[in-house]
Amino acid sequence: MTAGRTPLILLLLGSGGLLLGALGFQYLGGLAPCPLCHNQRWPHIAVVALALVGLAALRDRRTAFALLPIAAALAVTAGIGVYHAGIEYAWWAGPGACSGAAGFDPAKVTAGSLKDMIGAAAPARCDAVPWALAGVSLAGWNALISAGLAVFALAAGLRALGTPAR
């Protein structure tokens, strides 16, 4: 294993671990993910895919071609995590579809629309903190860990660009 592949392995383990943790909270812990939770997962899926491609196909300096997009994907999920945590802690308003802005008006409910409403149940709330550790929500932890991984990926990618080709 070359030194250029080590960052890819660490990033694969980091994003893969965050994804497995999210799925564990969902399926083992019973915490239903909101739409923003799902949005935070997609960049991690991209990181896992890019890291696997990088490990399979790239060596040395060309590793940067996997590391730099990985850094971008991790920055995106960190940004979504900050946005989501801000909604959870009421720093700003969230999307109406999954936050307190989506109100229920009982005057608009008819016998015929009740069945449709049950079938179209609202997603989990984006403005609720279903679990926290040390006062930081899951979205907050995703933001912090993903930001750290993004900085690591960017530094490794820039270092790989400076490595002479072999």
Image: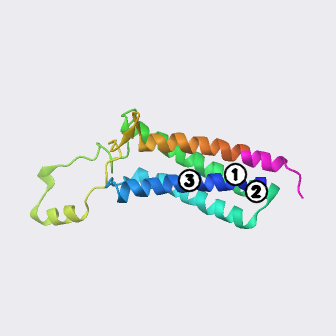
Instruction: Check the image and report above or below for 88 versus 71.
Output: above
- Residue 154 point in image, percent of width and height: 69, 45
- In-image side of 8 versus 61 (left or right): left
Residue extending furthest toward the left: 111
Q: Are marks 1 and 2 in contact (CB under 8 Å)?
A: yes
How far apart marks 2 and 3 lie (CA) works out to 17 Å
Residue type pointed to by label 2: Thr
Q: Neighbour class for label 1 at 10 Å: few (<14), some, many (≥20)?
A: many
Label 1: which residue?
Answer: 7
First reached walking from the N terminus: tag 1 or tag 2: 1
Residue at (31% x, 48% y) in the render: 125
Label 3: which residue?
Answer: 15
First reached walking from the N terminus: tag 3 or tag 1: 1
Residue type pointed to by label 1: Pro
Q: Which residues are magenta?
A: 156-166
- In-image side of 153 versus 78 (left or right): right
Label 2: which residue?
Answer: 63
Can residue 43 be seen here? no
Residue at (44% x, 44% y) in the render: 139
Q: Secondary structure at mark 3?
A: helix
Residue type pointed to by label 3: Ser
Q: Neighbour class for label 2 at 10 Å: few (<14), some, many (≥20)?
A: many
How far apart marks 3 and 1 lie (CA) works out to 12 Å
- Residue 46 point in image, percent of width and height: 58, 59
Q: Secondary structure at mark 1?
A: helix
